[in-house]
Image: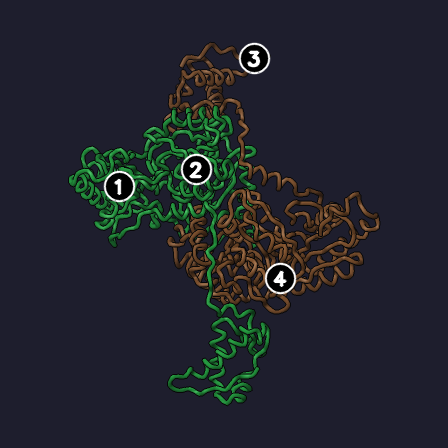
Chain colours: A brown, B green
Amino acid sequence: MRLPSIEGSGPGRQAVYRQIAGHIRREIEAGALRAGARLPPIRALATDIGVNRDTVALAYESLAGEGLLESVVGRGTFVRGLSVAAKPRALVDLPLADSVEGLLAYENARPRFGVAADAVPLHSLVPDPAFYPVNAFRRVLNQVLAREGAELLRYGSPQGRPGLRQILALRLQRGGGRVSTDDIVLCHGASQGIALALRLFAQSGDCVAVEVPTYHNVLATLVALGLRPAGIAQGPDGPDLEQLERTLQRPDVKAFYTIPTFHNPMGTTTSLGARQRILEIAARAGVPVIEDGFETDLRCFGREIPTLAALDRHGLVVQLSSFSKSLFPGVRVGAIAATGRAIDGLLALKRSTDLSDAMPLQAALEAFVRSGAYDRHLVRIRRMLRARTEAILDALAREMPAGTTFTRPEGGYQVWVELPFEVDSRDLLADAAREGVLFAPGSQFLPEGGPSRGLRLTLARADEDEIRRGVAILGRVAKRFHAAGPTALDAAAVNM
Amino acid sequence: MRLPSIEGSGPGRQAVYRQIAGHIRREIEAGALRAGARLPPIRALATDIGVNRDTVALAYESLAGEGLLESVVGRGTFVRGLSVAAKPRALVDLPLADSVEGLLAYENARPRFGVAADAVPLHSLVPDPAFYPVNAFRRVLNQVLAREGAELLRYGSPQGRPGLRQILALRLQRGGGRVSTDDIVLCHGASQGIALALRLFAQSGDCVAVEVPTYHNVLATLVALGLRPAGIAQGPDGPDLEQLERTLQRPDVKAFYTIPTFHNPMGTTTSLGARQRILEIAARAGVPVIEDGFETDLRCFGREIPTLAALDRHGLVVQLSSFSKSLFPGVRVGAIAATGRAIDGLLALKRSTDLSDAMPLQAALEAFVRSGAYDRHLVRIRRMLRARTEAILDALAREMPAGTTFTRPEGGYQVWVELPFEVDSRDLLADAAREGVLFAPGSQFLPEGGPSRGLRLTLARADEDEIRRGVAILGRVAKRFHAAGPTALDAAAVNM
């Protein structure tokens, strides 16, 4: 390698190391120095061009920083790969799939606002970490890894650990179902279960019937899969059955996603009668029902009602369960129960999606449930939830404007509130957040994302005192909005 | 409740408890006994109809076993939900999505055969569990859970743990990339990464260019997503560049999935020149490149070649990495590196797919890598792999029929063998499996699944002695097939 004359440093001139580096860079870019070529040793080059060794070292270092050179200890400095890394990047605007563009637009529509530092989190559905049985879980996790070793660190069966499926089947049988170990596919949280169940029956362009309002992440998942929601109005006893019948008869509607027990966001429980009717309607239409039972283990009041899966004689129901709300989300174990070819399809989809879940977590969960620790934990959680439910119902009755309606959940974390005047609850949110309480505005749970006078409050993160404080702030904000009179909103556009 | 007269037991008559149970069942089915109705106490009913108490208890128990009744301790026995659980089920044949039907058909096409008990597993890509650093990993897992507690058991960020992303970014930078912590989305194994990357650019009906042969699970994932493969012939230096240019110009081709380093199944490494050309072609077409680097950490011979991502000036490359082959699959951590809106899209897809990965495993992996244990493990794995690679190349040269060709991998677990005569390697598999060696027939890696004279051998599970034994058996079987002369196969239909 020959270097042109070096000008020396001084005003108006490049630093010497930069001149050296620039020359080498040009040689690489011109192809005169190729990938793998060895550069002269620092000492030799420094002598050769009459500069300090540190200057050459600095030049090499700066080129290495650009990714053009690499030093191998004891071997020297080499030209590395292509020089492209050093060229300014000219990013191509990659076209993303339409469904991804739709998903990004959907996510960008979510409200953003300032929040008081100690705002009461009545918006969050993440269970309170104060209740997680961390040490008990850590111990079983450590034990199963010590006991089963490397076997647990291979790929597991895509269907999931048989022992865990077995105890889940037994638990689902208690709920009246006839589930066997083979009828269950474990998955990476119930969210994955939802996505797999939707994909089992529907593909881009198809419709899926959903309750309105419904779980907002399901709406996002529909968008991501190129599916369209067909809304069924959700009332206190369950979905509007006439609308459901009409909708499921449509040829483009491939499934009905429903949350019959402790509905999200409404907190309602679909009555036994409505459950029977839903199954009759689905059977007539030959349309499968995806039953999301994410909080079924969290009943605090009233008698248990058989799940749709337990009532199903026709193999119509794909039932999702989860440990995220009843234990903690971090275990990432959900379950899908189904029959016949649906199981084959789910397994194939699961395999093509991520091959296998993490067996250490499934094994630890199995040990945790078998030991009775999960049932003991449930007792504790239900007691907590009962106290919080009573506190919020009490506070809502006391603090909210007259005429406000709200649901009375028999379990689960969510309560649905409807304001007695024309308003988009999103408009309340900015004020409420600033003054110290957060909630999920109803619009978030609507397929169209339009205005809603409804809002979801949750009991997951706030204790009784915080709940009382939060609802008091919410009541104050709501009364102020009410007193200010109807907003510019068109009353007809306000649904729920 | 009134019971009809009980006939007493005896030949030709139902057992008394069955008569009682049958009557109650009919009452429930007729609706005379409704859900929630309380049955008479055992003692009262026994006295009433003049039978032994145990007989009544048995009747109640058998109905409970059918799901019709439930006993609540201290409260009595109740009719449970609907009686449907007891009726014979009439399963509806649920229509699955076309893509799922396609996936099931694809999976059913895989060969099934008998296998010798001690068959040498030259088919498996699951790394040898004997090499998993189980106890070291168990200890860091226990430590991070003890240290970080409940925080680790919440949902994590959908992007993944920042500390782990940071050290992965540093490692990718060493390979010449300019990846930052924010350019990485962690995922549930690289398999999930593949599915997410495909969905980022393509949706049902679109095409994706893939090398032929290619990783069979990618072919399954394409089917599951309703995508069609556009094949690019893969040679010893990489994909056929003319074919790639023509294919990427097609408007229906939305991405190119490639495995440039230690190709699966071929074991080849795409040359630096070919990498540069691939990027030029992709840039001209404006088509993204999905670079699967699942074994990049497993180089045993030769100099490292910059990844496509490192050479990419245009933000065209989405790069996948994995710990499944270099550490163990059970950690279920993969990474996707990308830039700009691709990251936004991946994040949205990840969120809509399963919300978050399991943070305990990501935290443990971070601690494991930071401690240097991962790099020490790599030294050990590469040494093992080097010895096995030498053993198999040696054995192939010695044992296979004259004219057999095979690749000489510089790293990774797979070697591709092509037989020098007309044959579908599937036809060899049944004999080979029975005689004691397993391999993956080439057809498995072809989009159309047609016949192939190629076969993939792997070094993941067999040690040097086993490799020698397995290849000797394979050579014997191959020579026998050769000697038997051309099969009925049409020579023209045999590709690769």
Circle 2 crowding by C-alpha within 10 Å: few under 14, some 14–19, many from 20: many
In front: label 1 or label 2: 2
Q: Which mark is residue B228?
A: 2
Disc on the earlier residue, 4 or 3: 3
Compared across the picture, whether B32 is left or right of A440 comes to: left
A127 relative to B464, above or below:
below
The alpha-carbon separation of the residues under discs 2 and 4 comes to: 42 Å
Q: Are marks 1 and 3 on the same chain?
A: no
Question: Where is mark 4, residue-wise?
Answer: A270
Q: Secondary structure at mark 3?
A: loop
Q: Is residue A201 visible?
A: yes
A335 relative to A77, above or below:
below
The quadrant of the picture occupied by the N terminus of chain A is top left
The residue located at (49%, 66%) in the rendering is A173
Q: Are marks 2 and 4 on the same chain?
A: no
Observer-nearest of A302 and B253:
B253
The residue located at (65%, 45%) in the rendering is A448
**What residue type is disc 2 on?**
Arg
The residue located at (26%, 53%) in the rendering is B114
Question: Where is mark 1, residue-wise?
Answer: B425
Q: Which mark is residue B380?
A: none
Compared across the picture, whether B373 is left or right of A249 comes to: left
A76 relative to A134, above or below:
above
Observer-nearest of A411 and A445:
A445
Q: Chain of mark 3?
A: A
**What residue type is disc 1 on?**
Ser
Q: Chain of mark 4?
A: A
Q: Position of residue A331 (x, y in %)?
A: 51, 54
Disc on the earlier residue, 1 or 2: 2
